[in-house]
Image: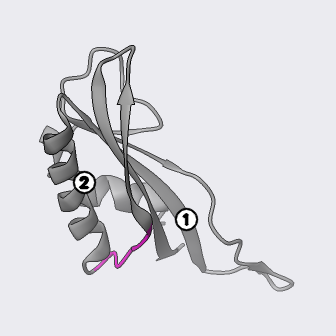
Amino acid sequence: MATAESIVDATLAPFAGGRIFPDVAPTGSARPYIVYQSVGGPDETTLDGLNELQNSRMQIVAWGEDRLSVALLMQQILRALTAAPVLGTPIGAPVSVYEDDTRLFGSRTDVSIWFNI
C-alpha cells in the first residue's frame, strides 16, 4: 500500500545524504537534512466509502548551514517531486526561514501528491 509519506521518503532518499525525516530531525543530525509531514489535502471519501485515489498536502523543509545551499536543495527536491512518477504539484513558491535557536537556514514548501492506496 502506498502512502504520501512512503512516496516522499523514496523520492527524496538520494538528497541530503539520505537524511530524510518524518516530522522532526533527531537532535544533532548532520546537515543538510530534509523534514516532511502531511499537512492536509482534500478528503476523497464519498458516500461509497474511501476512494482508492487519495491526496496529501506534504510540507517539505530543507535545513542547512546557509541560505544558498538550502535554496539549491529545495530546487532539487521540487524537480524530483514534480517529475514522473510522482507528478506532485507545488502549492506556492518556497518560503525562506531561519531559526535563531539552531542558527539554521531553511526552505519550506507544500506539494500536493495524489496516490493510489
Position of the C terminus by quadrant = bottom right
Q: Is residue 107 visible?
A: yes
Label ID, residue 67: none
Q: Residue at x 48, y 70 (%)?
A: 112
Find the magenta span and give its range.
85-91
User: Neighbour class for label 2 at 10 Å: few (<14), some, many (≥20)?
Assistant: many
Does the CB distance between marks 2 and 1 fall below 8 Å?
Answer: no
Amino acid on which disc 1 is placed: Ser
- Label 2: element kind: helix
Residue that extends furthest to the bottom in the rendered view of this protein? 48
Q: Is residue 81 magenta?
A: no
Q: Quick one: 108 or 117, which is closer to the camera? A: 108
User: Neighbour class for label 1 at 10 Å: few (<14), some, many (≥20)?
Assistant: many
Q: Is 47 located above or below residue 111 in the figure?
A: below
Q: Earlier in the sequence, mark 2 or mark 1?
A: 1
Tell me how far mark 2 sits from mark 1, CA to CA.
19 Å
Q: Which residue is mark 1?
A: 56
Residue 22 in the image: state x and y as whole percent: 43, 40
Q: Quick one: 66 or 47, which is closer to the camera? A: 66
Q: Which residue is mark 2?
A: 74
Q: Is residue 7 left or right of residue 55?
A: left
Q: Residue at x 25, y 22 (%)?
A: 29
Q: Is 10 located above or below residue 100 in the figure?
A: below
Q: Quick one: 8 or 94, which is closer to the camera? A: 94
Q: Is 97 located above or below residue 76 in the figure?
A: above
Q: Is residue 34 left or right of residue 32?
A: right
| Quadrant assignment, res 106 | top left
Amino acid on which disc 2 is placed: Met
Q: Is 17 located above or below residue 54 in the figure?
A: above
